[in-house]
Structure formats: structure tokens, C-alpha cells
Amino acid sequence: MGQRLTDEELSTLKTGAFGAVFMVSNADPGVLAMFRESFAAAGAIAEASGVVKEALSGGPLPELPRDSALEVESVVLPALRRAVEILVAKAPEDVAVYRSVVLAAADRTAQAHNGVSPAEAAVIERISAALGGSA
């Protein structure tokens, strides 16, 4: 078992994960779709374990910019990269869990509304790259 994460580190993991889902939702907007997508993503997050589950299931939702997709990405992608760095340093056994939960949540979000659009696929690719993997 790795080291305990600080509240700030847990918040970084959460910002990255929920922000990734928000980025995918924004790629193909629609109010009804967002409700469906958030429930789909919640299913992926419920499958998390270890510090990843602790980070994603407790506390308030992260504050994300809502003005533009570019602003959201400028917060979320660095948070994803930082989250992986934190896990590599403190809980290396949870790196793969975090990557798979974030990508599963992003993918489920995209699938929830008429399949994955090209815009959503491009966002998922950027999320995957920030996590240090390939889509």
C-alpha cells in the first residue's frame, strides 16, 4: 500500500477525473445527454478501488471553468498529468486503476448519447495522452 494522499492531492485526482467527463460532455453538448452521461460515468467511478475510490467518491465536486472548452482543458489536462505523477510517487499500485477509471468514465459518457462522435473521440484521445497512455 502506498502513502496517504493529502487533501490537495485527492482533489487533483478528482478534478482530473470529473473534468475528463465534463470535457467529453462538452464535446457534444445537450442537456438531456448530460444527465445520461453523468449516470454512465458514475458507473465507471463506482468500480474504482484504493486511493482512487477515496479521491473520487468523497467531498464536493471540483470547481471547473465553464466559459470555454479550451479553459476546461487548460485545467483538466494538467490535473490528469499531475494525478498520475502523484500516484506514481505515492500509490503506484493505483496508477492503472486511475487511468482505466478515467478512460472508462470518458468512454461511457461518450457512448451514453448516440455513440461516440468524432469530437468526443478527439477529446478522449487528449485525455488518454494526458494520462500517459494511448487511446
Image (cartoon, rainbow, N blue to C red):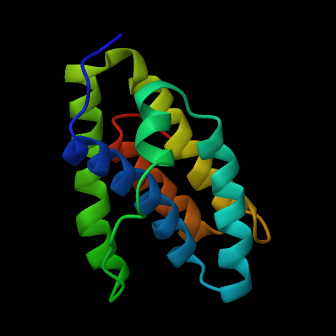
Q: Nearer the viewer, residue 13 or 20?
A: 13
Identify the residue at image location x=40%, y=42%: 55
The residue at the far top in this view is 1
Image quarter for residue 119?
bottom right
Which of the 4 quarters of the picture holds residue 6?
A: top left
Give coordinates of residue 126: x percent, y percent. Answer: 39, 54
Judge whether residue 116 can be spotted in this image.
Answer: no
Tell me which residue sits at (49%, 28%) in the image: 97
Position of 26 relative to 80 (above/below): below
**Residue 45 can be seen in this image:** yes
- Indicate the quadrant containing the N terminus: top left, top right, bottom left or bottom right: top left
Which residue appears farthest toward the front when viewing the image?
59
Residue appearing at x 55%, y 39% in the figure = 101
In percent of width and height, residue 124 lies at 50, 55
Residue sitting at 74 percent across and 70 percent down?
36
| Number of numbered discs on residues | 0
In the rendered structure, the answer to whether residue 31 lies left or right of residue 58 reads right
Image spot of residue 72 (x, y percent): 32, 73
Q: Is residue 78 above or below residue 62?
A: above
Image-based side of 63 in relation to 116, left or right: left
